[in-house]
Amino acid sequence: MTGKASASDQAFLNRQRERLLKLQVEISSATEAEELEETGMRDQSLGEAHEFEEDAQRLSLLDVDGTLVGQNIQRLRRIARAREN
């Protein structure tokens, strides 16, 4: 019975590792996309006339994007730790 339980436990762990790997790839891709978008917004605003309202909206979006990127980086660290075990 222990042989069966450990084989099923191992299968479960393998499925979980695969899920973590997929999640890691998805989060990494999303983080890279957010960082590229942030860079694009900054570059775009350099060559344009500035309206205070538009600047405020851009800053707000950059702040939200930065928060999301920071959260994703923390999630990636937790995933990396989980995959090490």
Image (cartoon, grey):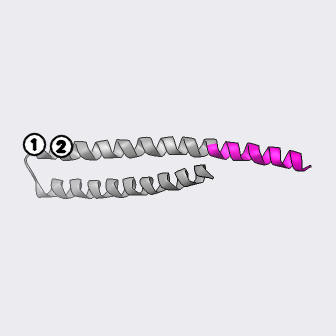
Residue at (70, 47) in percent of width and height: 13
> Would you place residue 59 above or below residue 15 in this image?
below
Q: Are marks 2 and 1 in contact (CB under 8 Å)?
A: yes
Q: Position of residue 74 (x, y in %)?
A: 45, 57
Residue 43 image label? 2
> Would you place residue 77 above or below residue 23 in this image?
below
Query: Mark 1 = which residue?
Result: 47
On screen, residue 26 versus residue 67, left or right, reads: right
Dot 2: within a 10 Å radius of its alpha carbon, few (fewer than 14), some, or many (20 or more) residues?
A: few
Identify the amino acid type marked 1: Gly
- Asked if the stretch drawn in magenta spans residue 9, the answer is yes
Identify the amino acid type marked 2: Asp
Residue at (75, 45) in percent of width and height: 10
Q: Which residue is the extreme one toward the left?
A: 49
- Distance from disc 2 to disc 1, alpha carbons, whole Å, reads 7 Å
Q: Which residue is the extreme one toward the front?
A: 84
Q: Position of residue 35 (x, y in %)?
A: 32, 46
Over which residues does the magenta segment extend? 1-17
- Asked if the stretch drawn in magenta spans residue 10, the answer is yes
Q: Which residue is the extreme one toward the right?
A: 1
Q: Position of residue 48 (x, y in %)?
A: 10, 44
- Helix or strand or loop: what does disc 2 sit on? helix
On screen, residue 5 versus residue 51, left or right, reads: right
Question: Which is the main secondary structure of the residues drawn in magenta?
Answer: helix
Q: Position of residue 84 (x, y in %)?
A: 59, 50
